[in-house]
Image (cartoon, coloured by chain):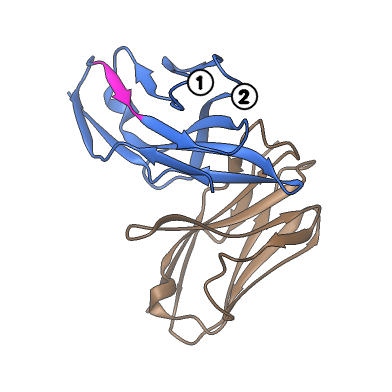
Chain colours: A brown, B blue
């Protein structure tokens, strides 16, 4: 398996623009997670899905953020409109239902909003 | 709620020194415990895990023992290498309300100097 695949690896955008981050989880994994990592706040859970259904989105910063999982092999995280404070590395991770095997993380998308 | 506490970093060691990174946790039930490693510019990678009390997880010369009596999962390595320089995250996973919840520590940066 190729692991969790995220795209793009780097994104630079201007304030106010829409940004879409993409994730392909490992085939067969039931859970998908979106995290954000910054120096100031560390690793933050934004939202997670179980069997394509959003379970907990309490970590989503505000209405400008939205996430979808239309099928078991694809998820998106959208920011609209983007702001400089959204600059961070965004990680997607997936896991099997029991979670005892741990997560597999993607390589992340480094977002810079100027 | 659950929590994971890691020792503050950065930790700076000379090559071949002994490594200990402390991790303690609080949980309501019987969690699984994990150590993840993040190399510069990459996503988190699962390093080792333990799913029940007294289990020892090990990988790449690292090991950690699940100590229920002291609620700890300290990471150790007998002889570190420069290539071990990274950020190490302790985490726990526990089922709650029918879904798994994972809590990460804040990470401990390790720098190994030649």
Looking at this view, is B39 or B104 the one in front?
B104
Give the chain letter at badge 1. B
Quadrant showing the N terminus of chain A: top right
Q: Is residue B54 above or below residue B70?
A: above
Residue B21 painted magenta: yes
Q: Is residue A7 above or below residue A60?
A: above
Could one spot residue A113 in this view of the protein? no
The circle on residue B32 is: none
Q: Mark 2: give few (<14), some (14-19) or many (20+) Cα within 10 Å.
A: some
In this rendering, position of residue A13 left or right of residue A33: left
Q: Residue at x 47, y 20 (%)?
A: B69
Q: Position of residue B83 (x, y in %)?
A: 32, 27
Q: Mark 1: give few (<14), some (14-19) or many (20+) Cα within 10 Å.
A: many
Residue A7 painted magenta: no
Q: Position of residue B111 (x, y in %)?
A: 24, 33
Q: Quadrant of residue B42?
A: top left
Quadrant showing the C terminus of chain A: bottom left
Q: Position of residue A63 (x, y in %)?
A: 59, 81
Could one spot residue B34 in this view of the protein? yes
Q: Which residues are magenta?
A: B18-22
**Same chain? Circles 2 and 1:** yes
Tell me the residue that label 1 is attached to.
Answer: B66
Looking at this view, is B23 or A19 the one in front?
B23
Tell me the residue that label 2 is attached to.
Answer: B51
Q: Quadrant of residue A112?
A: bottom left
Looking at this view, is B26 or A4 the one in front?
B26
Q: Position of residue B24 (x, y in %)?
A: 41, 32
> Which type of secondary structure does the marked residue at label 2 adopt?
loop
Q: Residue at x 51, y 20 (%)?
A: B66
Q: Are marks 2 and 1 in contact (CB under 8 Å)?
A: yes
């Amino acid at each position: 398996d190729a692991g969790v695949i995220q795209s793009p690896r780097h994104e630079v955008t201007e304030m106010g623009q829409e940004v879409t981050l993409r994730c392909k989880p490992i085939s067969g994994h039931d859970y998908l997670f979106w995290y954000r990592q910054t120096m100031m706040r560390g690793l933050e859970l934004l939202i997670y899905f179980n069997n394509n259904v959003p379970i907990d989105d309490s970590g989503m910063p505000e209405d400008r953020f939205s996430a979808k999982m239309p099928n078991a092999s694809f998820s998106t995280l959208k920011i609209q409109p983007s702001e400089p404070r959204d600059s961070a590395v965004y990680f997607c991770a997936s896991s099997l239902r029991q979670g005892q095997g741990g997560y597999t993380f993607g390589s992340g998308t480094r977002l810079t909003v100027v | 709620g659950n929590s994971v506490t890691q020792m503050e970093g950065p930790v700076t060691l000379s090559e071949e020194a002994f490594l200990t990174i402390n991790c303690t946790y609080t949980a309501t039930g019987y969690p699984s415990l994990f150590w993840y490693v993040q190399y510069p510019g990459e996503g988190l990678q699962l390093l080792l895990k333990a799913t029940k009390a007294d289990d020892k997880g090990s990988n790449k010369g690292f090991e950690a023992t699940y100590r229920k009596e002291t609620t700890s999962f300290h990471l150790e390595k007998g002889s570190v290498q420069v290539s071990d320089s990274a950020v190490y995250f302790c985490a726990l996973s526990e089922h709650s309300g029918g879904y798994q919840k994972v809590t990460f520590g804040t990470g401990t940066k390790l720098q190994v100097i030649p």
